[in-house]
Amino acid sequence: MTVPAQPRRWSRVAGYAMMAAAGVGAAIVPTPSVEQATGPLVYLWAAFLVGGGLLSTYGAASDRWIGEHLGLPLLWAAFTVYAVVLAAVLSPAGIVASLALGAFALLLIGRWRDVSAIRREATRQARSPG
């Protein structure tokens, strides 16, 4: 049984919008461990969450691959930084959170690869005569 595209798409819209909102929150109240580890770059990672979340939200909402194609690498980078910083804390809770964020970053890479395949196929179809 296949799930209709609409519910899948709108769950991605909601998820990406939540990532953008998390970025706004991270800019207003930076995570202390990330701020200590990266200094003022903490605001860059927050901007990556906001920008990647908004681009991906646009892509999912409009059903256009370009938004996710551009936004997912920003989200992947932000989640990877947070995962590495949490792992460096070396507390049991930090390591658990690092594993969860790292796993999520890998899922974002997988989604980006799927979107890249869609982009390649769309480009191929646009170039084919007929």
Image: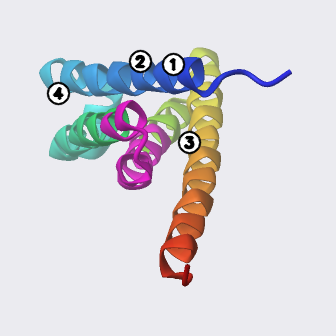
* Residue closer to the observer: 89 or 100: 100
Image point (63%, 52%), residue name: 114
Residue beneath label 1, please?
11
Q: Would you say 26 lies left or right of 4 here?
A: left
Q: Earlier in the sequence, mark 4 or mark 2?
A: 2
Which stretch appears magenta?
58-80
Please name the residue that numbered disc 4 is placed on: 27
* Label of residue 14 in the image: 2
Residue 31 is at least partly visible in this image: no
Q: Contact, CB < 8 Å: mark 1 with mark 4?
A: no
Residue type at numbered disc 3:
Leu
Q: Nearer the viewer, mark 4 or mark 2?
A: 2
Query: Do the numbered discs 2 and 1 sit on residues whose CB atoms are within 8 Å?
Result: yes
How much space separates mark 3 and mark 1, taking CA atoms? 14 Å
- Please tell me which residue is depicted at 51% across the width and 18% down the height of the picture: 11
Front-most of residues 70 and 43:
70
